[in-house]
Image: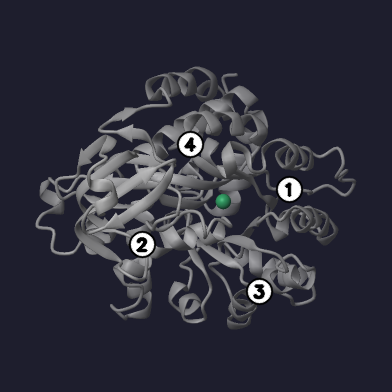
Amino acid sequence: MLDLLIKNANIITMDELSPVIRGGSVGIAGGKLVFVSETVPEAFSHEGAKRTIDAKGNIVMPGLINAHAHTAMCVMRGYADDYRLDDWLFNKIFPIEGRLTREAVLAGVRLGIAEMLASGTTSYSDMYSNQPAAAEIILESGLRANLSNGIIALSEDFDIEADRATKELAALIRDWHGAGNGRIRADASIHAEYTSPPWVWERVHAAAAENGLVTHIHLCETAKETAECMERHGGKTPVEIFSDHGIFDTPAAAAHCVHLTENDMRIMAEKGVSAVHCPVSNLKLASGVANVKRMAELGINLALGTDGCASNNDHDLFEEIKLAALLAKGTSLDPTAVPAYEALRMATVGGAKAQGRENEVGRLKPGFEADLIMLDVHKPRLQPLFDPVAAAAYAANGSDVCLTVVRGKVLYENGEWTTIDAEKAIAEVQRVAVPIVLGKK
Ligand SMILES: [Zn+2]
């Protein structure tokens, strides 16, 4: 018997064989997709399902994948806006982060998860501190996540064994990699080229290679970052120097990729590095616009990320989807650049690949994990519905999500969360995090 049957849906499968199914059905059992088809297959039409949802023409699509986030930063949402990246990071963000308690970070994780579930994110890659504790919250919430703590080694006498990110990586590998039947994965992480020396990268990468982890990094976010790297490393760009040190010899997910040379892009394509496009954050911090069109032409896997909420200021991936398409068109003066389907692909199939989950999620296809969302199209902004793909990419936003399912389990439905108390999460952030951000604690 099926656990969940969704009928009468306009399904965006993201599966190349039949990308859109009008008025179709999705059957779920044991957390997996059993069928995604025009009609309920004969074998299942009699035995029924524990629960049947009539989608009434709503859009059903794969859950969105946020391939670059710093979830707990949502406690600083709207606190420090409209600054230059270096001023913002070193003078506004880092001093507060130095004071954030474990309690405050975890409150941020809960708030961020509530927001992600309500706006259609079913899996995310997070780079932040306190990840082993965050993993417990994620496990309970039912979400999927790749967790890492980006290593930062700015002092001359940096002790890698005593370093917190090193210890958290070890704990994630030991206790959490593959937890929840694979819902949680550990990533290795180098915060960025400018925050640690090559010997540190090599140590982190060795852990990635040994344990089969994705290496999550920030890469070429600003022109200044690339210029200063070239000065430090004899004219080599961050991509070239990371590549020289073997960091891209195993799967890597690189956030931003705004200031890349043609050679950088060719290296990334050859090494299979995923580029995680974060258009909202890049625009807000005036870092520039990644050349997504060229990266796509070279066959680089493209994913989308919100980055932290201090530079976004939300976790709504629908904004990133629309901007990914519009920026590529606007900067290339080519309206055919990054069509709607390709933008959705970045938030689903591309994100799954960046997370090392390409055979698990990102498509609605039998055998894949049942991670899906439903968009309520019965509202003025989404009517008429000529093309579900265009509606999802260009007209929808996170608040149109009326159902979020991960591994067959309903985690959010019509304004209600089933695994997390959103009201409590908001109150907790007010109580334990806001006073710290304001410098009152
Ligand atoms: Zn970031």
* Along the viewing direction, whichever of 177 and 291 lies nearer the viewer: 177
Q: Is residue 108 visible?
A: no
Q: Amino acid at mark 3?
A: Lys
Q: List x then y, in percent, for residue 213.
A: 69, 54
Q: Tell me the residue that label 4 is attached to.
A: 74
Q: Tell me the residue that label 3 is attached to.
A: 271
Which of the two discs, 2 and 1, sits closer to the camera? 2
For residue 151, the mark is 1
Which of the two discs, 2 and 4, sits closer to the camera? 2
Q: CA distance from mark 4 to mark 1?
A: 21 Å
Q: Earlier in the sequence, mark 1 or mark 3?
A: 1
Which of the two discs, 4 and 3, sits closer to the camera? 3
Asked whether mark 2 lies closer than 8 Å to ligand 1, one says no
Secondary structure of residue under mark 3: helix
Q: Amino acid at mark 4?
A: Cys
Q: Amino acid at mark 1?
A: Ile
